[in-house]
Amino acid sequence: MTNATAIAIKQAKDLLKNRVVLIQFLIMPAMALILTELVAKGEPELPDLMFVNMFASVFVGMIVVTSTTGIIAEDREHKSLRFLVMAGVKPAQYLAGIGVVVLVASAIVSVMFGLMGGFTPVDFGKFMALMLVSSVASMTLGALIGILSKNQQAATAVAMPVAMVLGFAPMIAMFNEAVKKVCAPLYTMQASLALDDLSAGLGQPLLIMLANAVVLVVAFAIAYQKKGLRN
Protein backbone atom coordinates (compact mmCIF):
# COMPACT_ATOMS: atom_id res chain seq x y z
CA MET A 1 0.00 0.00 0.00
CA THR A 2 1.44 3.40 -0.98
CA ASN A 3 1.74 6.33 1.41
CA ALA A 4 -0.86 8.32 -0.50
CA THR A 5 -3.33 5.42 -0.41
CA ALA A 6 -2.87 4.90 3.32
CA ILE A 7 -3.45 8.60 3.99
CA ALA A 8 -6.53 8.61 1.76
CA ILE A 9 -8.07 5.61 3.56
CA LYS A 10 -7.39 7.18 6.97
CA GLN A 11 -8.89 10.50 5.90
CA ALA A 12 -11.97 8.89 4.35
CA LYS A 13 -12.70 7.12 7.64
CA ASP A 14 -12.18 10.36 9.60
CA LEU A 15 -14.46 12.29 7.23
CA LEU A 16 -17.30 9.78 7.52
CA LYS A 17 -17.09 10.07 11.31
CA ASN A 18 -17.10 13.89 11.26
CA ARG A 19 -20.74 14.96 11.08
CA VAL A 20 -19.87 18.67 11.18
CA VAL A 21 -17.85 18.45 7.98
CA LEU A 22 -20.46 16.26 6.29
CA ILE A 23 -23.15 18.81 7.11
CA GLN A 24 -20.95 21.60 5.72
CA PHE A 25 -20.64 19.74 2.44
CA LEU A 26 -24.39 19.17 2.17
CA ILE A 27 -25.72 22.54 3.35
CA MET A 28 -24.92 24.43 0.13
CA PRO A 29 -26.73 22.10 -2.32
CA ALA A 30 -29.63 21.95 0.14
CA MET A 31 -29.87 25.75 0.20
CA ALA A 32 -29.60 25.91 -3.59
CA LEU A 33 -32.43 23.38 -3.97
CA ILE A 34 -34.73 25.17 -1.53
CA LEU A 35 -34.20 28.64 -3.03
CA THR A 36 -34.43 27.35 -6.60
CA GLU A 37 -37.74 25.61 -5.98
CA LEU A 38 -39.31 28.24 -3.72
CA VAL A 39 -37.91 31.46 -5.17
CA ALA A 40 -36.27 31.23 -8.60
CA LYS A 41 -38.94 29.09 -10.27
CA GLY A 42 -41.66 31.33 -8.90
CA GLU A 43 -40.09 34.54 -10.16
CA PRO A 44 -39.95 34.88 -13.97
CA GLU A 45 -37.41 37.70 -13.65
CA LEU A 46 -34.87 35.46 -11.91
CA PRO A 47 -32.77 32.96 -13.92
CA ASP A 48 -33.60 29.36 -13.01
CA LEU A 49 -29.93 28.60 -12.40
CA MET A 50 -29.22 31.68 -10.31
CA PHE A 51 -29.05 29.93 -6.95
CA VAL A 52 -27.43 26.76 -8.32
CA ASN A 53 -24.51 28.74 -9.74
CA MET A 54 -24.36 31.04 -6.72
CA PHE A 55 -24.16 28.33 -4.09
CA ALA A 56 -21.87 26.17 -6.23
CA SER A 57 -19.37 29.05 -6.22
CA VAL A 58 -19.76 29.53 -2.48
CA PHE A 59 -19.26 25.80 -1.93
CA VAL A 60 -15.94 25.50 -3.79
CA GLY A 61 -14.64 28.84 -2.57
CA MET A 62 -15.62 28.52 1.06
CA ILE A 63 -16.48 25.01 2.23
CA VAL A 64 -13.67 23.19 0.41
CA VAL A 65 -11.07 25.69 1.66
CA THR A 66 -12.12 25.67 5.32
CA SER A 67 -12.61 21.88 5.41
CA THR A 68 -9.16 21.17 4.00
CA THR A 69 -7.57 23.74 6.29
CA GLY A 70 -9.14 22.01 9.28
CA ILE A 71 -7.82 18.61 8.18
CA ILE A 72 -4.24 19.82 7.75
CA ALA A 73 -4.22 21.98 10.88
CA GLU A 74 -5.52 19.06 12.95
CA ASP A 75 -2.72 16.82 11.66
CA ARG A 76 -0.14 19.44 12.60
CA GLU A 77 -1.64 20.17 16.02
CA HIS A 78 -1.83 16.48 16.91
CA LYS A 79 1.72 15.92 15.60
CA SER A 80 0.44 13.47 12.97
CA LEU A 81 2.11 15.47 10.22
CA ARG A 82 5.49 15.36 12.00
CA PHE A 83 5.40 11.57 12.11
CA LEU A 84 4.35 11.38 8.46
CA VAL A 85 7.26 13.57 7.37
CA MET A 86 9.70 11.58 9.52
CA ALA A 87 8.33 8.41 7.91
CA GLY A 88 9.30 9.78 4.50
CA VAL A 89 5.89 10.92 3.25
CA LYS A 90 6.53 13.47 0.52
CA PRO A 91 4.44 16.64 -0.09
CA ALA A 92 2.89 15.20 -3.26
CA GLN A 93 1.92 11.97 -1.46
CA TYR A 94 0.39 13.78 1.50
CA LEU A 95 -1.53 16.26 -0.67
CA ALA A 96 -2.67 13.45 -2.98
CA GLY A 97 -3.94 11.35 -0.07
CA ILE A 98 -5.90 14.22 1.46
CA GLY A 99 -6.88 15.61 -1.94
CA VAL A 100 -8.44 12.41 -3.26
CA VAL A 101 -10.88 12.29 -0.35
CA VAL A 102 -11.74 15.99 -0.53
CA LEU A 103 -12.14 15.88 -4.31
CA VAL A 104 -14.37 12.80 -4.24
CA ALA A 105 -16.60 14.53 -1.68
CA SER A 106 -16.56 17.70 -3.79
CA ALA A 107 -17.40 15.72 -6.93
CA ILE A 108 -20.42 14.16 -5.23
CA VAL A 109 -21.67 17.59 -4.18
CA SER A 110 -20.94 18.97 -7.65
CA VAL A 111 -23.07 16.22 -9.19
CA MET A 112 -25.91 17.29 -6.87
CA PHE A 113 -25.62 20.86 -8.14
CA GLY A 114 -25.42 19.64 -11.72
CA LEU A 115 -28.56 17.54 -11.41
CA MET A 116 -30.41 20.52 -9.96
CA GLY A 117 -29.32 22.59 -12.95
CA GLY A 118 -30.90 20.20 -15.46
CA PHE A 119 -27.97 20.66 -17.85
CA THR A 120 -27.55 18.98 -21.21
CA PRO A 121 -24.84 16.29 -21.22
CA VAL A 122 -22.34 18.71 -22.79
CA ASP A 123 -23.10 21.52 -20.35
CA PHE A 124 -23.04 19.07 -17.45
CA GLY A 125 -19.51 18.07 -18.49
CA LYS A 126 -18.47 21.72 -18.61
CA PHE A 127 -20.07 22.36 -15.22
CA MET A 128 -18.21 19.43 -13.65
CA ALA A 129 -14.90 20.51 -15.18
CA LEU A 130 -15.25 23.99 -13.71
CA MET A 131 -16.26 22.64 -10.32
CA LEU A 132 -13.43 20.10 -10.12
CA VAL A 133 -10.69 22.52 -11.18
CA SER A 134 -12.02 25.02 -8.63
CA SER A 135 -12.08 22.29 -5.99
CA VAL A 136 -8.43 21.41 -6.70
CA ALA A 137 -7.43 25.05 -6.26
CA SER A 138 -9.51 25.44 -3.08
CA MET A 139 -8.23 22.19 -1.61
CA THR A 140 -4.63 23.23 -2.22
CA LEU A 141 -5.23 26.70 -0.77
CA GLY A 142 -6.80 25.17 2.32
CA ALA A 143 -3.82 22.83 2.68
CA LEU A 144 -1.44 25.77 2.36
CA ILE A 145 -3.19 27.73 5.10
CA GLY A 146 -3.27 24.65 7.31
CA ILE A 147 0.43 23.90 6.89
CA LEU A 148 1.40 27.50 7.71
CA SER A 149 -0.80 27.74 10.83
CA LYS A 150 0.37 26.89 14.35
CA ASN A 151 -2.92 25.27 15.37
CA GLN A 152 -6.55 24.80 14.35
CA GLN A 153 -7.68 28.05 15.92
CA ALA A 154 -5.10 30.07 14.03
CA ALA A 155 -5.89 28.18 10.83
CA THR A 156 -9.59 28.95 11.13
CA ALA A 157 -8.87 32.62 11.81
CA VAL A 158 -7.00 32.86 8.50
CA ALA A 159 -9.06 30.47 6.40
CA MET A 160 -12.47 31.94 7.15
CA PRO A 161 -11.92 35.47 5.78
CA VAL A 162 -9.99 34.12 2.78
CA ALA A 163 -12.76 31.62 2.05
CA MET A 164 -15.45 34.27 2.43
CA VAL A 165 -13.73 36.46 -0.16
CA LEU A 166 -13.39 33.55 -2.58
CA GLY A 167 -16.92 32.29 -1.97
CA PHE A 168 -18.87 35.53 -1.87
CA ALA A 169 -16.90 37.72 -4.30
CA PRO A 170 -18.68 36.20 -7.34
CA MET A 171 -22.03 36.84 -5.66
CA ILE A 172 -21.19 40.48 -4.92
CA ALA A 173 -19.77 40.89 -8.43
CA MET A 174 -23.25 40.20 -9.81
CA PHE A 175 -24.26 43.60 -8.49
CA ASN A 176 -20.96 45.52 -8.54
CA GLU A 177 -18.86 45.92 -11.69
CA ALA A 178 -15.83 47.19 -9.74
CA VAL A 179 -15.71 44.01 -7.63
CA LYS A 180 -16.05 41.97 -10.80
CA LYS A 181 -12.97 43.59 -12.32
CA VAL A 182 -10.86 43.45 -9.17
CA CYS A 183 -11.68 39.77 -8.51
CA ALA A 184 -11.31 38.66 -12.15
CA PRO A 185 -7.98 36.83 -11.51
CA LEU A 186 -9.57 34.64 -8.82
CA TYR A 187 -10.45 31.11 -9.89
CA THR A 188 -13.86 31.30 -8.21
CA MET A 189 -14.66 34.46 -10.15
CA GLN A 190 -13.69 32.82 -13.43
CA ALA A 191 -15.74 29.74 -12.56
CA SER A 192 -18.76 31.89 -11.77
CA LEU A 193 -18.48 33.84 -15.01
CA ALA A 194 -18.17 30.62 -17.00
CA LEU A 195 -21.12 29.04 -15.21
CA ASP A 196 -23.30 32.00 -16.14
CA ASP A 197 -22.77 31.23 -19.82
CA LEU A 198 -21.81 27.61 -20.45
CA SER A 199 -22.44 28.07 -24.17
CA ALA A 200 -19.29 30.20 -24.38
CA GLY A 201 -15.84 28.71 -24.65
CA LEU A 202 -14.10 27.64 -21.44
CA GLY A 203 -10.55 28.13 -22.72
CA GLN A 204 -9.65 31.39 -20.99
CA PRO A 205 -11.48 30.73 -17.69
CA LEU A 206 -9.93 27.27 -17.35
CA LEU A 207 -6.44 28.59 -18.14
CA ILE A 208 -6.73 31.23 -15.40
CA MET A 209 -8.13 28.68 -12.97
CA LEU A 210 -5.38 26.16 -13.76
CA ALA A 211 -2.77 28.90 -13.31
CA ASN A 212 -4.24 29.58 -9.84
CA ALA A 213 -4.05 25.87 -9.01
CA VAL A 214 -0.43 25.49 -10.20
CA VAL A 215 0.75 28.47 -8.13
CA LEU A 216 -1.00 27.10 -5.05
CA VAL A 217 0.44 23.59 -5.51
CA VAL A 218 3.98 25.00 -5.76
CA ALA A 219 3.39 27.19 -2.70
CA PHE A 220 2.12 24.20 -0.72
CA ALA A 221 5.14 22.07 -1.66
CA ILE A 222 7.51 24.81 -0.50
CA ALA A 223 5.57 25.35 2.73
CA TYR A 224 5.46 21.59 3.44
CA GLN A 225 9.21 21.32 3.06
CA LYS A 226 9.84 24.27 5.38
CA LYS A 227 7.07 23.88 7.97
CA GLY A 228 6.21 20.18 7.96
CA LEU A 229 8.40 19.30 10.92
CA ARG A 230 7.69 22.38 13.00
CA ASN A 231 5.38 22.17 16.04
Image (cartoon, grey):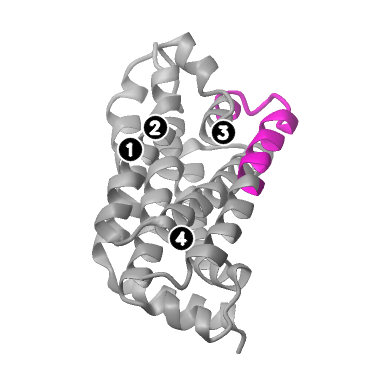
| Cα–Cα span, label 1 and label 3 | 20 Å
**158, above or below 104, in the image:** above
Q: Is 75 situated left or right of 122 in this image?
A: left
Residue type at mark 1: give it.
Pro
Question: Which sits earlier in the primary sequence, circle 1 or circle 3?
Answer: 1
Circle 1 SS class? helix
Q: Is residue 204 magenta?
A: yes
Question: Would you call the spot at circle 4 few (<14 residues within 10 Å), some (14-19), or many (20 or more)?
Answer: some
Circle 3 SS class? helix
Pinpoint residue 219: horizontal percent, then vertical percent. 58, 52
- Residues 120 and 133: in front is 133
Residue type at mark 4: give it.
Ala
Badge 4 is on which residue? 105
Q: Are marks 3 and 2 in contact (CB under 8 Å)?
A: no
Question: Which sits earlier in the primary sequence, circle 4 or circle 3?
Answer: 4
Residue type at mark 2: give it.
Val
Question: Would you call the spot at circle 1 few (<14 residues within 10 Å), some (14-19), or many (20 or more)?
Answer: few
| Cα–Cα span, label 4 and label 2 | 22 Å
Q: Are marks 4 and 2 in contact (CB under 8 Å)?
A: no
Badge 1 is on which residue? 161
Question: Which sits earlier in the primary sequence, circle 1 or circle 4?
Answer: 4
Q: What residue lies at 59% left-to-right and 58% top-to-bottom?
A: 222
Residue type at mark 3: give it.
Ala
| Cα–Cα span, label 3 and label 2 | 14 Å
Q: What residue lies at 57% left-to-right and 23% top-to-bottom?
A: 184
Q: Are marks 2 and 1 in contact (CB under 8 Å)?
A: yes
Circle 2 SS class? helix
Q: Which quarter of the figure has residue 94?
A: bottom right
Badge 2 is on which residue? 165
| Cα–Cα span, label 1 and label 4 | 23 Å
Badge 3 is on which residue? 191
